[in-house]
Image (spheres, grey):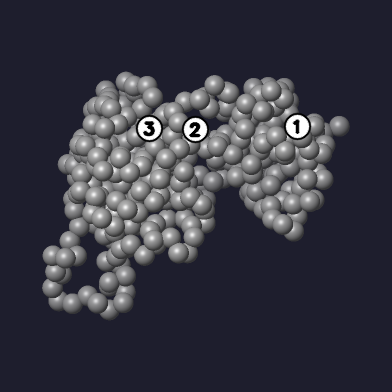
Amino acid sequence: MKPKVIVYKKVDQKVLEYIKQTCDVVYFEKLDSQNYSEFLHALKDAHGILGVGLKIDNSLLDQALQLKIVCNVSVGYDNLDLLELSKRGIMAANTPEVLNETVADTIMGLIIAAARRMPELDDWVKTGKWDANLAEKWFGVDVHHKVLGIIGMGGIGTAVAKRAHFGFDMDILYHNRSRNPDAEQIYGATYCSLEELLNQSDFVCLMTPLTPETEKLMGKREFEQMKESAIFINASRGKTVDEEALIHALQNGEILAAGLDVFEPEPVKKDNPLLSMKNVVTLPHIGSATMETRFNMAMLAAENLVAGLRGDVPPTLIQSEVHTKSLD
């Protein structure tokens, strides 16, 4: 008999067909209040689940007594209680590396858009405000030959460093749990303390996973340490930033601007002050959102699922100890 799995995210038909070769699939394009009870019923005898965002904790696992593997279609896994999964002998897998280049493209886009005020100027042109002379009040700042500080030199951080170093002749500073010799040798990156990075960087890019150690890593003190001319970029998780402190820093001129792909909560609340600030570029958590990359992520998650249920080691199994890393 084939193992039973639940896919609770819309995925390409080719991904579903791959899973169906070895598993019986219960498929939900998305979970909502209308189908959640049906999902819980299916969960009782499911051997594997694949999707993104669902909180996998004690209460859910108590209803999944046959579960062998949980597969996230994301690089992040802060929705998973890894310790509880480990206690129950349930494997967990994510989809790292496959999205590095795409997310790095998004981050460079945020850097350029915030520095050159592109959304603001786009609106200025489209609303018919462009006159003969472009006044200095609309000028942005250069990106090339500036200092980029990367907090979290993992796969995505390294891909950003590559673009910044070779594409924009930027000097790279980085702060990480451990040193990255390849980034230092290939991209001329300099390892430093968080305080040094914040003091010296023209652009500060936060790329840490969300862990208890990194929650609100950027707060009031950290924004005060940044240059008044600096631009802050966050494409990690909303909870890695004290959002009130970021708002205060922007409103009081402690930093120049920000580019944000993530918020806390998501979707961002309509009355969030960040949405009314012209010096903030906002995106709806689309760092990896291209057709190609999302397909590759889903297929990697499917390969993890099938491998785990066959008794093999999933290609990107999450080891329980990585959850304790503060920066990677």
Q: Nearer the viewer, mark 2 or mark 1?
A: 2
Q: Is residue 314 visible?
A: no
Query: Which residue: 72% across, 57% down?
Result: 33
Q: Which residue is mark 2?
A: 212
Q: Residue 203 location, x and y as percent?
A: 26, 43
Q: Is residue 318 left or right of residue 32?
A: left
Callout 2 secondary element: loop
Outermost residue toward the right in this view: 1
Residue corresponding to mark 3: 152
Nearest to N terminus: mark 3 or mark 1: 1
Element under label 1? loop
The three-letter amino acid code for the residue at tag 1 is Leu
At 30% from the left edge and 40% from the top edge, which residue is drawn? 221
Q: Position of residue 7 (x, y in %)?
A: 70, 44
Residue 45: x and y in percent read 82, 37
Residue at (64, 42) in percent of width and height:
55
Q: Mark 3 belongs to which amino acid?
A: Gly
What is the quadrant of the N terminus in the image? Answer: top right
Q: Check disc 1 and report the residue beneath it.
A: 67
Q: Earlier in the sequence, mark 2 or mark 1?
A: 1
For the residues labelled 3 and 2, the Cα–Cα distance comes to 15 Å
Comparing labels 3 and 2, the label whose residue is closer to the camera: 2
Position in image of residue 124 (x %, y %): 27, 72
Secondary element at tag 3:
loop
Whole-angstrom CA distance, mark 3 to mark 1, is 33 Å
Q: Earlier in the sequence, mark 3 or mark 2?
A: 3
Asked whether disc 2 touches disc 1, contact meaning CB atoms under 8 Å apart, the reply is: no
Q: Please tell me whether residue 187 is drawn above or below residue 232 in the rendered image.
A: above
Picture quadrant of residue 189: top left
